[in-house]
Amino acid sequence: MTDDTNNVSSTPSGDPWLLTPGPLTTSLSVKQAMLHDYGSRDATFIDLNARILERLVAIVNGAGNYVSVPLQGSGTFVVEAMIGNFVPADGKLLILINGAYGQRIAKICDYYKRDYRVQESAEDVPVDTAQLDATLDANPDIGHVVVVHCETTSGILNPIKEVSEIVARHKRSLLIDSMSAFGALPLDAQEIEFDAVVASSNKCLEGAPGMGFCVARETALEQTEGNSPSLVLDLYDQWRAMQKNRQWRFTPPTHVLLAFDQALTEFEAEDGVAGRGGRYRANCDLLVAGMRAMGFKTLLPDELQAPIIITFHMPTNPEFDFNAFYDGLKDQGYVIYPGKLTVADSFRMGCIGRIDAEQVNGALDAVAQLLTRFGIEQIT
Ligand SMILES: *Cc1c(COP(=O)(O)O)cnc(C)c1O
C-alpha cells in the first residue's frame, strides 16, 4: 500500500516524475543552471541567447536559409505568433485538424479574423494527404497550410513529409506546429520544405517552460513585415530588433534561457534528435508493451503512434476509478494525464522528459500494484 513510503520514487529534487505532455521532468543540472541572475544587457547573457538561436536552426539542419526567433510565453503564444505573422490579412489558411491543437489554430484565426478553411479527420486518423491535394487543386486562394506534427491530443504522428511534398508541389507555404515533436522526431529542412515551424523550450528539448521559438525560412520571414496584429507577438519585429542589438525587445525570461542553454548542451550530448528520439522510442515501446501485458488497450495502432505520449482506453471495469488510479500513481511518484479525446474515454501517459527505462518500469509496477489493490484481474 502507499504508506510503504520506501517504494515511492522521486526525481533528484524530490518531485514526482511527470509522465505528461509537458511541462516535463527536467534534469537536476537544467534546474541548477537557473541559479543566476543576469541583466538583459549582460554580455554573457547576450552571447548565450545568440548561441541558443543558432543551435535551434541547427536542429532542423537549416543553417544559411533559416533563422530562429524566440518569444516569451507558452507554446500557444508562438503558434499564435506564427499564424499572425505568416498569414497576411488578405490571405487564406488551410488548417489540417485531427485534434485539439489543430482546433486551437482555428480559434486563433477567429480571434485574428483571418480567413481559413478546415480539413478535419478523426482524432485517431492521420491527416488525409489525398484530400489535401484535391483541396489545394480546387482552391487557388489558399496561400498557406498548417499542420500539427505530433497531435498531442492522441499522440498520433501526422505524415509531415507527404504533406510538405504536396504543399510544395502546389507552391503554397507550409507552417508546422511541432511543439511536442521538435528535437525528438526528425524535421530536416533539406528534406522537408516548410516556411516556419514552432516549438517550445519545455517539451522534447527538456528545458524549463516559459518561451517558444519559431524557426523560419529567412526569405519567407522577410515578407511578413507589418502582418502581425499583435505587438508582443510580432516575430518580424522581434527578429529585426534582435539583429540590430542582439537583445529581446521586452524583458527576456533569463532563467528560462539559462536552463534552455544547458538543456541544449544535454540534448547535443545525447546525440541530438537520433539519441533523444531513440530514448523516447525505447520508453514508448516499454510502456506500451507493459500496459498491454496488463490488458490495457492503446487508442492507436503502433504504426500511427509517435513516441511522445500514449493514449489508453479507459477500462470499463466498475472497480476502476480513474481518480483513485491517478492519485495512487501520484502517491508512488508518477504523474499521468487525463484524456483529451472526444472519440473515446481515455487517459494518457507521456514518455518524454528526463525519464528512461527505470521510471517507465517503476510506473508499470505502480500500475500493477493499483490493479491488485482495486481487485481487478482482467481489464475490460
Ligand atoms: C503543448 C502543445 C502546444 C502548446 O501548448 P502550451 O500549453 O501553450 O505550451 C501546441 N501544440 C501542440 C501540438 C502541443 O503539444
Image (cartoon, rainbow, N blue to C red):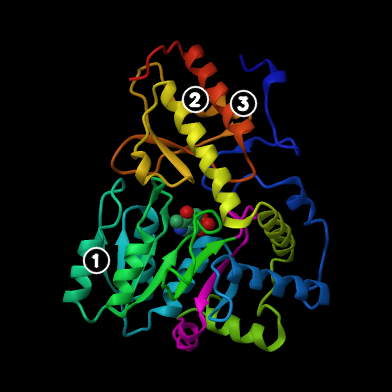
Going by the numbered disc 1, the residue's amino acid type is: Leu
Q: Residue at x 40, y 57 (%)?
A: 101
Res 74 seen here = yes
Segment tinted magenta in the rendering: 201-228
- Where is residue 253 shown, x and y percent of the image? 69, 66
Under circle 1, the secondary element is: helix
In the image, which disc is placed on residue 132?
1
Report if residue 365 lies within the magenta region.
no
| Residue type, numbered disc 3 | Asp
Dividing the image into 4 quarters, which one contains the N terminus? top right
Instruction: Answer with mark 2 or mark 3, whichever residue precedes in sequence.
Output: 2
Pinpoint residue 266: horizontal percent, then vertical percent. 70, 54
Q: Nearer the viewer, residue 28 or 241?
A: 28
Q: Mark 2 points at which residue?
A: 325
Residue at image position (49%, 46%) is: 308
Residue found 65% across the figure and 80% down from its top: 249
| Element at label 3 | helix
Would you say the beta carbon of the disc 2 residue lies within 8 angstroms of ligand 1? no
Residue 200 % position (x, y): 56, 61
Give the Cα separation between the discs numbered 2 and 1.
41 Å
Q: In which quarter of the image is the C terminus?
A: top left
Residue receiving disc 3: 331
